[in-house]
Amino acid sequence: MKLWYSPASPFVRKCLLVARERDLFDRLELLEASTTVINPNERLMEDNPTGKIPALVLDDGTVLFDSRVICAYLDSLHDGKKLMPRSGDKRFKIMTLEALADNIMDSAVANRYERGLRPPEYQWSDWSEGLMRKVRNGIDHIEKEWVPTLGRTPNMGSIAVASLLGYLDFRYPDWNWRRGHPKLTRWFKRFSERDSFTATAPE
Ligand code: BEZ
């Protein structure tokens, strides 16, 4: 299988964490793609018409995207404990946690593009502040409601949250998401010691 990836993407990191947690990493061939809205990777767009990473090309040519689909597919390939429960209330809880972390990542990544790619004369500080308000609200919500679901062993939701927090440390090192979030800080400290997490750190 070939995985279109960028080392900085938190969505890619989710997929790599799943692969490493379930011993599937050696089955992935990594295709690095530098791609933005204004400078898309043409080869990647043949596989994923929207030009987004990650995208997973299976050996028969089938292409899977986005990260939630790829993570679910990887989770179907192993016989160990599933990262996403197969049924029951827990399944929908963990799906929602994964979606929450993904949605927060969307805002953090959008703001990174706004500040890093858009020419300064076109930047709009209210837009940026609105995006980062979503990030702060989301982190507050995880601190208040979701820490018990994160648990001690990884699940699909906790992997998404770890990818999100790793991205905030990487792209927003001065923003200090830890302030006011002691439970999440403690949980993340333990998760970030996992081999899968250190092996997937953005360069
Ligand atoms: C980044 O450089 O922050 C980034 C790169 C690819 C996808 C998402 C974020």
Image: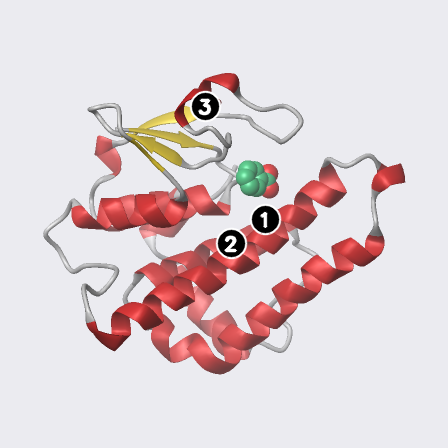
Residue 195 visible, this orientation: yes
* x 10%, y 52%: residue: 79
User: Residue furthest toward the right?
Assistant: 121
The kind of residue on which mark 2 rests is: Gly
The kind of residue on which mark 1 rests is: Phe
27 or 174: nearer the viewer:
27
Could you say which disc has been placed on residue 16 in the image? Answer: none
Could you say which disc has been placed on residue 166 in the image? Answer: 2
Q: Position of residue 100 (x, y in %)?
A: 48, 64
Disc with the residue nearer the chain's start (3 vs 1): 3
Marks 3 and 2, how far apart at CA: 25 Å
Element assignment for label 3: helix
Could you say which disc has been placed on residue 170 in the image? Answer: 1
Disc with the residue nearer the chain's start (3 vs 2): 3
**Label 1 CB, ligand 1: below 8 Å?**
yes
Q: Ligand 1 is in which quadrant of the figure?
A: top right
Q: Position of residue 68 (x, y in %)?
A: 37, 50
In the image, taking residue 100 as reference, residue 88 lies left or right, namely left
Element assignment for label 2: helix
Is 114 located above or below residue 93 in the figure?
above
* x 24%, y 45%: residue: 74
Q: Which residue is mark 3?
A: 44
- How many circles with numbers are drawn on the protein? 3
